[in-house]
Image (cartoon, rainbow, N blue to C red):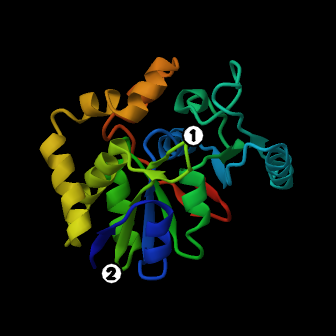
Amino acid sequence: MTVRCEWGLKGVELLRDRAGVIVIVDVLSFTTAVDVATARGALIYPHAYDRSADGAARAEEAARAVGAVLALPRKVAAGGQYSLSPASLAGAAPAARIMLPSPNGSTLTLACGDTPVFAGCLRNATALADSVRAFAGGRDIAVIPAGERWPQDDSLRPAIEDWLGAGAIISALGLPCAPEAELARISFEAARADFAHLIRTSMSGRELIEGGYEGDVEMAIDLDVSDGAPLLVDGAYRQ
């Protein structure tokens, strides 16, 4: 059993047929939102992110098909409406069905094929590692930091919050690591005393804070406050 770590969609495509389980890490904010909502007993259905009118119509149709509420874009959602903001999901009703489009975490989840997939973040790093270690059954574990997207060409922008989140999970797994996973582990352990400041002042952290979502960042950097391990079952993350 070896822990492997590769970035983004290409990482999923590389490792999905080699690993016994995949952990998607999208700290700001998809997997943090998933952990917060599923801890309340909600079901989170990932959906491809498409800002076009046709994409919005497809998302609405997909949500209706599973009896889910479609989460709105963060900047559009009003009070009481669900969005990618973890704070908006903190009051999710038990057994609520929520469809959550995301350009990174949802997209990667849907690319995992038949390989079991968990949603990992800083909030659930240790609890999730315990569940994943048992679930893998001796097979390799793939930890995938999602990263962000450059607006110019939609290419992958590595994101330190996802690297540190992946490192926290890998550190908690305590298993032999491929070099890439070992470096993520070392990075988190070296930054453990200061990781919250690093994430607050990172590009992703600053974007959210300057946009008025400081609370989302604070929820995301709250290490090991959750005992959840959201697993995708029948198209929805649940605990």
Residue 239 in view of the camera: no
Whether residue 93 sits left or right of residue 9 in the image: it is right
Pick the front one: 19 or 184: 184
**Residues under labels 2 and 1: Cα distance?**
30 Å
Secondary structure under tag 2 reads loop
Pick the front one: 113 or 65: 113
Residue 148 picture location, percent across and down: 47, 46
Residue 25 picture location, percent across and down: 42, 52
Q: Which mark is residue 138?
A: 2
Say which amino acid is labelled 1. Answer: Ala
Q: Quadrant of the N terminus?
A: bottom left
Q: Is residue 18 above or below residue 163?
A: below
Residue 192 picture location, percent across and down: 18, 40
Residues marked 2 and 1 touching at CB (< 8 Å): no
Residue sitting at 51 percent across and 38 percent down?
A: 36
Residue 181 picture location, percent across and down: 25, 64
Say which amino acid is labelled 2. Answer: Gly
Estimate how packed mark 2 is, as few (under 14), some (14 to 19) or many (20 or more) residues with alpha carbons within 10 Å.
Answer: few
Q: Which mark is residue 37?
A: 1
Q: Is residue 37 above or below residue 154?
A: above
Residue sitting at 53 percent across and 75 percent down?
A: 115
Q: Is residue 153 above or below residue 151?
A: below
Estimate how packed mark 1 is, as few (under 14), some (14 to 19) or many (20 or more) residues with alpha carbons within 10 Å.
Answer: many
Identify the mark nearer the N-term, 2 or 1. 1
Whether residue 61 sits left or right of residue 228 in the image: it is right
Q: Quadrant of residue 65?
A: bottom right
**Farthest left residue in view:** 190
Secondary structure under tag 1 reads helix
Residue sitting at 86 percent across and 47 percent down?
A: 57
Whether residue 200 sits left or right of residue 106 in the image: it is left
